[in-house]
Amino acid sequence: MTPTTSGASGGNGAHATAKFDVLIIGAGIAGLYQLYRLRELGLNVRAIDAASEVGGTWYWNRYPGARVDSEGHVYQYLFSEDLYKGWSWSERFPSQSEIERWLNYVADQLDLRKNIQFGATVQSAHFNETTERWVVATDKGDVIDTQFLITCCGMLSAPHVSFPGQETFKGLAFHTARWPQQPVDFAGKLVGVVGIGATGIQVIQTIAEKVGHLKVFVRTPQYILPMKNLKYTAADVEAYKSKFKALTEQLPHTFTGFEYDVEYAWAGLPPQQRRKVIEDCWNDGSVKLWIASFAELFFDEGVNAEISEFVRAKMRERLRDPRLCELLIPSDYGFGTHRVPLEQNFLEAFHRANVEVVDVKTNPIERITTEGIQTADGTIHPLDVIILATGFDAGTGALTRIDIRGRDGRSLREEWGRDIRTTMGLQVHGYPNLFTTAVPLAPAAALCNMTTCLQQQVEWITGCISYLCGKNLKFIEPSKALEDQWVAHHDETANAMLIAKTDSWYLGSNVEGKPRRVLSYTGGVGSYRQKCDEVVASGYEGFATH
């Protein structure tokens, strides 16, 4: 598939414009599948990625201990039985390196690399109202003219770092999402980890025994769930592969796109049976207690309080030290209203003599100095290595860091800076022929097994473009009325949940000035799919086409 070129050139000595039917930003889970599906339609497609290889999130997040907390057998594409069965996981919750190898296997099996441009960052994408096409520019000077633009940039791909002085630090400093490809030597080093969210937990439990001394800077404690990560035998692999057909029928219709779903109603069970369900879910060693115990956990403060105290008690049993309990066990928000990480001996790491907790909730980090981290009381903590597990500008950050402009020069960065809105997380009013995955107001922004949700979004986008091509249409854009309707439905659904009452990255609360809105659609994966299917069945009612 060779692009056509024109004699036009962009500003600043840019290359001649390459023309495509579709340009995809990102070569991770969504981008690879989107490339495959649109290429199968016979379209002239290019994917572009800043990385040097495929993988998306799993290319960049190669920090110590990085692994998925979805079971590997559901964290896969389900569009091809041959592709699914041609890969075998070595363990229940695969590590970053194994997932990266899997995505390279996918790219090889589907021969995708020939349509991917690596090592280029998209800087701008402007809609040309005269041609009704997008003009996209990269940091390498490329200027690309495309009819359709699809963003597959990932939900958690825009690192959020907010400490002044980082550039002055004389040691090594890394954000976990921009970890170097070469291993980092921690032996004998003074290491500081900032943050104990899901990523910080994985780092801490992995490096605690490898460093000279570890200081963990703790602001917001997290509820945790124990990960039981079984090594797979050949029989285990054969067993999960035998479920392929059942998984294709089941996963798209559960609440969160996982294999398990809520089976019981809290009010329908006596106390001893409720306790048994909670214990069984806890002992499963997965996220089951969070997303497949009782739906009331998300809505009923009384139910949430009881399950929260159950988890706190489990954590107290392991921590023992009253000060550690105070700093590491949540007390001011409920279980499941934040992201709930899986862990492996995370709490036990704090019993090591070489691990120290620094409370930065009452004494915040003020800046990074040449020597280390300075807190508000003036204390400087000397460090050789600083690891920033400080999270992301979730859902929106990957796109607001690109200068995206739609009709009448409107800026997505400016509009989302005032109010975060999309139409089903698939398009945005005012930005014709722009399709989005893993952005706000769709399940893929959180509360979803990402492969399940991203596959569904890719398939919807593919179907929409196929529909346009079949009818010789060149343009589609959601109306403001339709977007208003979806935003209202999203908010009504989200605001009924306790998540909406708790500050976290789920609401963008971790990024100063970010408009407050629950980022993920919380009505359930199956319900969302049904609503997307209804749009197709209506002939894209509410969308302008021509």
Image (cartoon, rainbow, N blue to C red):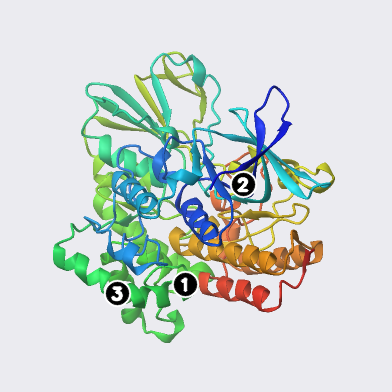
Residue depicted at 15% across the width and 63% down the height? 234
Sequence-first tag of 2 and 1: 1
Query: Foreground mark, 2 or 1?
Result: 1
Give the number of callouts. Answer: 3
Residue 25 image point, x, y percent = 57, 45
- Tell me the amino acid under the disc marked 1: Pro
Q: Quadrant of the C terminus?
A: bottom right
Residue assigned mark 2: 396
Residue 12 picture quarter: top right
Residue 409 image point, x, y percent = 82, 42
Sequence-first tag of 3 and 1: 3
Residue assigned mark 3: 243
Pick the residue in front: 493 or 130. 130
Query: Foreground mark, 2 or 3?
Result: 3
Q: Residues within 10 Å of mark 2 (few under 14, many from 20)?
A: many
Residue depicted at 49% across the width and 73% down the height? 296
Residue assigned mark 1: 252
- Tell me the amino acid under the disc marked 3: Lys
Horizontally, residue 409 falls left or right of residue 252, namely: right
At mark 1, the secondary structure is helix
